Amino acid sequence: MSSAMLPGPQAWRLAAENRADLFQALDPGARIGLVARGSPEKMLVWESSDHAVEAKDMPFKGYGAAEVDILLAADNDALEKIVVATEGPLFEVLRAGIRSGSVVCYMLRRRCDLETKGYDEILEALGFVFMGACR
Protein backbone atom coordinates (compact mmCIF):
# COMPACT_ATOMS: atom_id res chain seq x y z
CA MET A 1 0.00 0.00 0.00
CA SER A 2 1.57 3.26 -1.07
CA SER A 3 1.14 6.26 1.12
CA ALA A 4 0.25 9.69 -0.18
CA MET A 5 2.71 12.47 0.44
CA LEU A 6 2.18 15.62 2.43
CA PRO A 7 2.34 18.87 0.47
CA GLY A 8 5.74 20.53 0.48
CA PRO A 9 6.43 23.38 2.93
CA GLN A 10 6.59 25.94 0.10
CA ALA A 11 3.15 24.94 -1.25
CA TRP A 12 1.77 24.93 2.32
CA ARG A 13 3.13 28.43 3.02
CA LEU A 14 1.65 29.73 -0.25
CA ALA A 15 -1.70 28.13 0.62
CA ALA A 16 -1.69 30.15 3.86
CA GLU A 17 -0.76 33.32 1.95
CA ASN A 18 -3.68 32.70 -0.43
CA ARG A 19 -6.01 32.80 2.59
CA ALA A 20 -4.28 35.55 4.57
CA ASP A 21 -7.76 36.65 5.69
CA LEU A 22 -7.95 33.50 7.83
CA PHE A 23 -4.45 33.69 9.26
CA GLN A 24 -4.05 37.40 10.03
CA ALA A 25 -5.90 37.16 13.36
CA LEU A 26 -3.65 34.39 14.70
CA ASP A 27 -1.32 35.20 17.57
CA PRO A 28 2.39 34.66 16.95
CA GLY A 29 3.25 31.09 17.85
CA ALA A 30 -0.14 29.67 16.84
CA ARG A 31 0.49 26.33 15.11
CA ILE A 32 -1.58 23.99 12.95
CA GLY A 33 -0.19 20.58 11.95
CA LEU A 34 -1.03 18.14 9.16
CA VAL A 35 -0.08 14.45 9.26
CA ALA A 36 -0.72 11.49 7.00
CA ARG A 37 -2.89 9.13 9.03
CA GLY A 38 -1.37 6.08 7.37
CA SER A 39 2.26 7.05 8.01
CA PRO A 40 2.50 9.82 10.61
CA GLU A 41 6.30 10.03 10.89
CA LYS A 42 6.41 13.60 9.63
CA MET A 43 4.17 16.60 10.31
CA LEU A 44 3.72 19.70 8.16
CA VAL A 45 3.19 22.77 10.34
CA TRP A 46 1.81 26.24 9.74
CA GLU A 47 3.27 28.56 12.38
CA SER A 48 2.13 32.14 12.73
CA SER A 49 4.75 34.81 13.39
CA ASP A 50 4.54 38.58 13.72
CA HIS A 51 4.74 39.12 9.98
CA ALA A 52 3.80 35.94 8.16
CA VAL A 53 2.82 32.30 8.35
CA GLU A 54 5.77 29.95 8.03
CA ALA A 55 5.50 26.33 6.94
CA LYS A 56 7.93 23.60 7.90
CA ASP A 57 8.32 19.85 8.14
CA MET A 58 8.81 18.47 11.64
CA PRO A 59 9.06 14.97 13.08
CA PHE A 60 5.72 13.76 14.44
CA LYS A 61 6.22 12.44 17.97
CA GLY A 62 2.61 11.59 18.69
CA TYR A 63 -0.58 13.50 19.35
CA GLY A 64 0.29 14.46 22.91
CA ALA A 65 3.76 15.72 21.96
CA ALA A 66 2.83 17.43 18.68
CA GLU A 67 3.13 20.97 20.13
CA VAL A 68 0.39 22.29 17.84
CA ASP A 69 -2.98 23.82 18.67
CA ILE A 70 -4.88 21.98 15.93
CA LEU A 71 -3.81 18.77 14.22
CA LEU A 72 -5.31 17.59 10.95
CA ALA A 73 -4.83 13.87 10.22
CA ALA A 74 -5.69 12.99 6.62
CA ASP A 75 -6.06 9.62 4.92
CA ASN A 76 -4.34 8.98 1.56
CA ASP A 77 -7.34 9.98 -0.60
CA ALA A 78 -7.72 13.24 1.30
CA LEU A 79 -3.98 13.96 1.08
CA GLU A 80 -4.05 13.64 -2.70
CA LYS A 81 -6.90 16.19 -2.83
CA ILE A 82 -5.14 18.47 -0.33
CA VAL A 83 -1.92 18.50 -2.40
CA VAL A 84 -3.90 19.52 -5.51
CA ALA A 85 -5.92 22.13 -3.56
CA THR A 86 -2.94 23.99 -2.04
CA GLU A 87 -3.13 26.40 -5.00
CA GLY A 88 -6.88 26.85 -4.76
CA PRO A 89 -9.81 25.84 -2.58
CA LEU A 90 -7.75 24.26 0.21
CA PHE A 91 -10.13 25.09 3.05
CA GLU A 92 -13.12 23.80 1.07
CA VAL A 93 -11.26 20.51 0.53
CA LEU A 94 -10.27 20.32 4.23
CA ARG A 95 -13.85 21.08 5.30
CA ALA A 96 -15.27 18.40 2.97
CA GLY A 97 -12.67 15.93 4.28
CA ILE A 98 -13.60 16.67 7.87
CA ARG A 99 -17.29 16.26 7.04
CA SER A 100 -16.69 12.90 5.29
CA GLY A 101 -14.28 11.59 7.93
CA SER A 102 -11.26 11.37 5.60
CA VAL A 103 -9.66 14.19 7.61
CA VAL A 104 -9.81 14.14 11.41
CA CYS A 105 -9.41 17.50 13.13
CA TYR A 106 -7.95 17.26 16.62
CA MET A 107 -8.27 20.42 18.69
CA LEU A 108 -5.43 20.01 21.15
CA ARG A 109 -6.28 23.15 23.14
CA ARG A 110 -9.46 24.19 24.91
CA ARG A 111 -11.94 26.14 22.82
CA CYS A 112 -11.36 29.27 24.94
CA ASP A 113 -7.62 29.05 24.28
CA LEU A 114 -8.18 28.64 20.53
CA GLU A 115 -10.49 31.66 20.47
CA THR A 116 -7.98 33.72 22.46
CA LYS A 117 -5.22 32.80 19.97
CA GLY A 118 -7.38 34.05 17.06
CA TYR A 119 -8.53 30.76 15.52
CA ASP A 120 -12.18 31.80 15.01
CA GLU A 121 -11.91 32.40 11.24
CA ILE A 122 -9.90 29.24 10.57
CA LEU A 123 -12.24 27.08 12.62
CA GLU A 124 -15.24 28.53 10.81
CA ALA A 125 -13.55 27.84 7.44
CA LEU A 126 -13.03 24.23 8.56
CA GLY A 127 -16.73 23.95 9.40
CA PHE A 128 -16.67 24.48 13.16
CA VAL A 129 -18.96 27.24 14.37
CA PHE A 130 -19.12 27.92 18.09
CA MET A 131 -22.09 29.72 19.55
CA GLY A 132 -22.22 31.57 22.83
CA ALA A 133 -19.70 32.76 25.33
CA CYS A 134 -16.67 30.72 26.26
CA ARG A 135 -16.76 30.25 29.99
Image: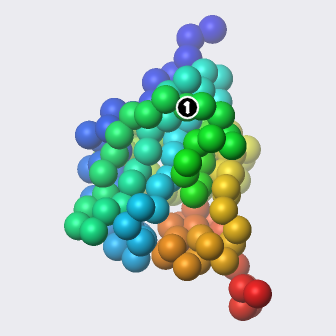
Q: Is residue 111 left or right of residue 47?
A: right
Q: Residue at x 44, y 45 (%)?
A: 45
Q: Is residue 79 left or right of residue 27?
A: right
Q: Residue furthest top?
A: 1
Q: In the picture, which quadrant includes the N terminus? A: top right
Residue 26's image quarter?
bottom left
Label 1 amino acid?
Phe
Is 45 or 89 nearer to us in this picture? 45
Residue 49's image quarter?
bottom left
Q: Image height check: is 126 above or below 102?
A: below
Q: Residue at x 67, y 40 (%)?
A: 63
Q: Image height check: is 127 above or below 69?
A: below
Q: Residue at x 65, y 34 (%)?
A: 62
* Residue 120 at x, y percent in the picture: 55, 76
Q: In the picture, which quadrant includes the C terminus? A: bottom right
Is 65 or 108 nearer to us in this picture? 65
Q: Residue furthest bottom?
A: 133
Crowd tier of the residue under label 1, counting other residues whose Cα lies within 10 Å: few below 14, some 14–19, many 20 or above = some
In the picture of the structure, the residue carrying the numbered disc 1 is 60
Q: Is residue 89 left or right of residue 70?
A: left
Is residue 80 something one can see in this rendering?
A: no
* Residue 132 at x, y percent in the picture: 73, 90
* Residue 2 at x, y percent in the picture: 56, 11
Q: Residue at x 55, y 23 (%)?
A: 41
User: What kind of element bears circle 1?
Assistant: loop
Query: Which color scheme does this rendered protein use?
Result: rainbow
* Residue 24 at x, y percent in the picture: 34, 73
